[in-house]
């Protein structure tokens, strides 16, 4: 399916501008050329008719018997062909008019020939409208002899129409050639932008660490500034994560002291209530510290891999680790149709997200955990982790992603896993949801970006 460029596309704007310029230029050439040719042909016809009417007068003789005759035929043989569109006529008072052999019907209006000066007009001829020339000359007896010559207007129109048709055909070819050249120029001129877009795509998919390639002088500063911004942003994020980790570490010791003192207060009857409140708040602070430490450990100081997530290879080492961590559970994977799919996501973050969800499923499963990858040719992707455990109440599902949420205190854990998973999903731009499945709990990761099947 051909994708048409959007209205905001530079390529479309240039194409419209080139098309408009070519159409205006071709139209101007067509109008001016047709006008110049028409004027030239009309002038040539008029000059030819004026020459022929003078020739007609020069060749006309008055016989001794008073009859009008020509000493010889006109030089143009078309006046001898019946209804050829070229006609002449000589008339004089009291004499039989003399007409060309081409005029087998009708007659020419001699009123145009009423002056010694040659006059012309478009008049009615034997076969339609005709360009008529005529003038008068004194005969031997002082009478006016009328010389009239005519050419069908259709002859002139035919020449002009034929030229116009040929000109239109030639100009259409020229317009197509100019438009093709314009398209080639646009494609060549915008190729650096296409390369820049491809570099952005590689950067977004994690295949590169910065914008790669060399660009023209007009674009090179933009690419350089973007690369500088990318590096600066990575450094700022890395520093922020390190500082968050350092802050969490620095709070650990004072928080441990506060927790210890709160536990001692709870042992004294006169301040047990206050100690319990203080202990609850200290434990809430401890959960937050542990949460920030876990997030900082997952990304602080980490470089981007420059590679996207490859399905299903990303899950193979994770499943092996889960089998060792939960030996009494069976972990299986299905990825039919997704082999070789590359998602433009951070592979480390995605692997950590899978690890958290698979570990959580392993804790609650009775015997089996299933990881299923589904995708289509457009790159839309879904990962489902389903266990055969007891599932969760709908009210608990709504609170599952909150920091420190634990539904079974006897189960090992800090209540931070799903909260971290939520943050990872938001950072990568994927949808994360959990709901009860057919057997147990089902966690779903959905990505609607542009994955690539290798």
Image (cartoon, rainbow, N blue to C red):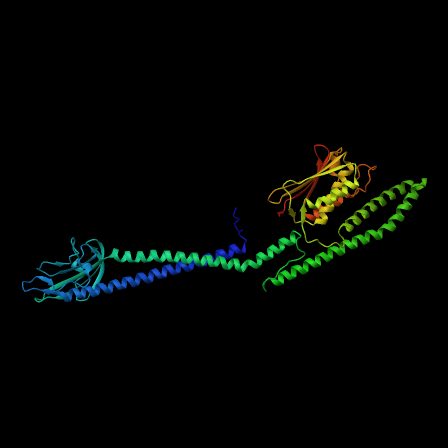
Q: Along the horizontal axis of the image, is 102 left or right of 2?
A: left
Q: Vertically, is 165 above or below 358? A: below
Q: Along the horizontal axis of the image, is 112 left or right of 406?
A: left
**Residue 420 occupies quadrant:** top right
The foreground one among 222 and 336 is: 336
Asked if one can make out residue 67 in the rendered structure from this viewpoint, the answer is: yes
Q: Residue at x 63, y 53 (%)?
A: 202
Q: Along the horizontal axis of the image, is 432 left or right of 262?
A: left
The foreground one among 39 and 308 is: 308
Q: Along the horizontal axis of the image, is 424 left or right of 157?
A: right
Residue 184: x, y in percent?
Answer: 49, 58
**Residue 96 occupies quadrant:** bottom left
The foreground one among 339 and 395 is: 339
Asked if one can make out residue 423 in the rendered structure from this viewpoint, the answer is: no
**Residue 398 occupies quadrant:** top right
Residue 182: x, y in percent?
Answer: 48, 58
Residue 316: x, y in percent?
Answer: 72, 44
Residue 393: x, y in percent?
Answer: 75, 33
Q: Vertically, is 75 above or below 418? A: below
């Amino acid at each position: 399916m051909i994708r048409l460029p959007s209205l905001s596309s530079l390529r479309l704007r240039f194409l419209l501008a080139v098309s408009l310029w070519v159409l205006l230029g071709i139209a101007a050439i067509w109008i001016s050329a047709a006008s110049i040719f028409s004027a030239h042909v009309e002038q040539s016809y008029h000059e030819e008719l004026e020459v022929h009417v003078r020739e007609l007068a020069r060749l006309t003789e008055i016989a001794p018997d008073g009859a009008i005759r020509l000493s010889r035929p006109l030089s143009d043989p078309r006046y001898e062909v019946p209804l050829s569109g070229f006609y002449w006529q000589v008339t004089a008072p009291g004499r039989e008019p003399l007409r060309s052999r081409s005029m087998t019907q009708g007659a020419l209006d001699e009123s145009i020939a009423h002056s010694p000066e040659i006059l012309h007009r478009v008049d009615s001829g034997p076969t339609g409208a005709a360009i008529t020339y005529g003038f008068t000359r004194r005969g031997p007896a002082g009478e006016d002899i009328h010389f009239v010559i005519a050419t069908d207007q259709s002859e002139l129109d035919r020449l002009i129409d034929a030229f116009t048709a040929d000109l239109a055909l030639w100009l259409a070819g020229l317009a197509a050639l100019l438009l093709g050249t314009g398209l080639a120029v646009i494609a060549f001129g915008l190729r650096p932008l296409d390369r820049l877009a491809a570099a952005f795509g590689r950067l977004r998919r994690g295949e590169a660490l910065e914008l790669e390639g060399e660009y023209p002088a007009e674009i090179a500063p933009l690419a350089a500034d973007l690369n500088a911004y990318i590096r600066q942003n990575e450094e700022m994020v890395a520093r922020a994560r390190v500082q968050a980790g350092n802050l969490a570490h620095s709070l650990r010791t004072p928080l441990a002291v506060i927790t210890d003192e709160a536990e001692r207060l709870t042992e004294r009857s006169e301040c047990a209530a206050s100690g319990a409140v203080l202990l609850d708040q200290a434990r809430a602070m401890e959960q937050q510290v542990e949460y920030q430490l876990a997030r900082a450990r997952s990304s602080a100081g980490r470089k981007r891999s420059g590679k996207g997530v490859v399905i299903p290879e990303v899950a193979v080492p994770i499943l092996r680790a889960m089998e060792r961590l939960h030996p009494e559970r069976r972990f299986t994977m299905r990825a039919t149709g997704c082999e070789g799919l590359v998602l433009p996501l951070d592979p480390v973050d995605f692997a950590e997200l899978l690890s958290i969800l698979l570990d959580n499923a392993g804790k609650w499963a009775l015997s089996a955990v299933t990881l299923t990858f589904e995708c289509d040719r457009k790159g839309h992707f879904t990962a489902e982790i389903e266990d055969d455990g007891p599932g969760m109440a709908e009210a608990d599902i709504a609170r599952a992603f909150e920091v420190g949420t634990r539904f079974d205190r006897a189960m090992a854990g800090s209540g931070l896993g799903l909260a971290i998973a939520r943050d990872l999903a938001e950072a990568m731009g994927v949808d994360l949801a959990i709901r009860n499945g057919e057997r147990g709990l089902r966690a779903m990761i959905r990505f609607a970006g542009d994955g690539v099947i290798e």
